[in-house]
Image (cartoon, grey):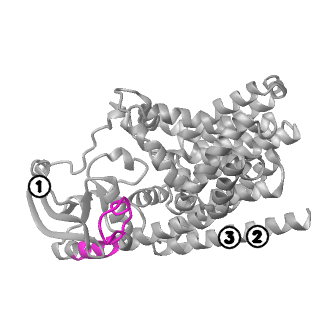
Amino acid sequence: MGGADARIVRNTALLILALVGLRLVAAAFTPITFDEAYYWMWSKNLAGGYYDHPPMVAYVIRAGTMIAGDTELGVRLVSILLALPMSYAVYRSAAILFGGARVAATSAILLNVTLLASVGTLIVTPDAPLLVASSFVLFFLAKVLETGRGAWWLAVGAAVGAALLSKYTAMFFGPAILIWLAAVPKLRRWFLSPWPYLGGLVALALFSPVILWNADHQWVSFAKQLGRARIEDFRPVFIAELIPTQIAFATPLVFILGAMGLHALTWRRAGALASRVLIETMFWTIVVYFVWHSLHARVEANWFAPVYPPFVIAAAAAANLVQWKPRQRRLVDFCLRWAAPTGIVMFAALIVQANTGWLSGYRRDATVRSVGVGWRELAAEIETVRVRSGATCVLAQDYGTTGWLAFYLPRGTCVAQQTQRIRWVNMPEPDPRLLAGKLLYVDELRAGGHPALNALFAQVTQIAQLQRKRGPLVVETYGIDLLEGAKGEVLDRSPPPEAR
């Protein structure tokens, strides 16, 4: 490695380490989201599967809390640190596919400054480990291409298996790989080799705990997630949301570079055929599905996580390899120069806004409902009410409130979601003795109260109204009901719609 290349590698490593350090600081003082609290509860009872997703997010959180405890930083620690091997995988993928330390370094940096990666590894969801596994799927396929050695297919299978343990979206890697092999003449020989099929068996073996868990639970998780794919009515409004949300999550300048890179790979034939087709198939196979999905339902921005590794490599190719006309070259140079500063500023602004609301003048925004600002204080007030009333367990209507209550109330407090018990099937049932006493019911204040509770309890009395606040903004007002005299089963054990 020459002196210039060594300097590029060193500077890239230092920048990525600094970005990871920034995320760790942000993670320590940003309250967890309701999804993170929910997945944290999963991590206390590890299993082969869960109602919503495969189990990898629970493993990641469990590893972090074993190191840093049941804190915001503990929940997020391992997810954030996984950005380091993710960056290595993207760096090496780009170096193999398109050559040169500059393309490789650009790819790794661009990925880390996207909001998808910076916020997506800080806020722990199944998309965080999926993004990391997707980077290694691409890296190991690049190694297959570089070396021609069949043994690398076992590594591909392991990476696909890890991706499948993260989120069911990873199933699209199979078609993408098959299209790649079929589209590149020199790669078709792999169809006659046992190695890709052995790699498939490795992926299946890693994914088998999820299959077995579903088999034991009426295939409920498969039915819930795969059932999203049904088109029941045509609602093109959701398609209109796709591009704006992806521009924001990719950050605008990275998005421009990525779009130009995909165009160059297709129409300018930048790079070798096998490299170009690999990037295109890994990107478009999943994107085409989500465009189709958006014909009837909203597609969340973070669902595109597995396409970001090939997308940023296409962006790096556009920035470093393609001979553009002068006007286009100026645009590329501008985007390349300012992509990292823009991404860092957007990340910092989002964290400041989520924690304080300053940037919107304390008005509501997209973060205010999901990030648990104010929950620590609210939970302390709820605990005071619980102790004063003599309640032995706290009930909630939804999984998000249940997760926040469990995380922020004193450890060991009985907390349960009154409905949708399939979500908690891997966890011990609440002690019947605790459910037999007085109970607190915590839910957003509703004008009509909770008529269903009157059929379950002899007495339902609202004993408090408590607010969750972010600065001067009241995010939610919760009604705290005291439930006494259970007439029967407290918890609704009706099967979920997918199991009926």
Above or below for 154 versus 415? above
**Amino acid on which disc 1 is placed:** Gly
Percent x, y for residue 150?
84, 36
Give the spatial CA distance, label 1 vs label 3: 51 Å
Q: Quadrant of residue 22?
A: bottom right
Label 2 element class: helix
Towards the viewer: 390 or 148: 148
- Determine which quarter of the picture holds residue 478: bottom left
Which of the marked residues, 3 or 2, is nearer the chain's N terminus? 2
* Among numbered discs 1 and 3, the one appearing first in the sequence: 3
CA–CA distance between discs 3 and 2? 10 Å
Please tell me which residue is depicted at 84% across the width and 25% down the height of the picture: 189
Q: Nearer the viewer, residue 342 or 114?
A: 342
Residue type at mark 2 is: Asn
Q: Nearer the viewer, residue 180 or 360?
A: 360
Looking at the rendered structure, which numbered label has been put on residue 449?
A: 1
Examine the structure image and report whether residue 15 is included in the region drawn in magenta.
Answer: no
Q: Quadrant of the N terminus?
A: bottom right
Task: Look at mark 3 in the image and give the residue it sits on.
Answer: 17
Name the residue furthest top: 192
Residue 203 in view: no
Q: Which residue is mark 2?
A: 11
State which mark lies toward you, 3 or 2: 2
Residue at the limit of the structure toward the right, as seen here: 2
From the image, state whether disc 2 or disc 1 is nearer to you.
Answer: 2
First to last magenta residue range: 360-384
The correct choice, above or below, for 106 with respect to 28 in the image is above
Residue located at (64% from left, 52% from top): 132
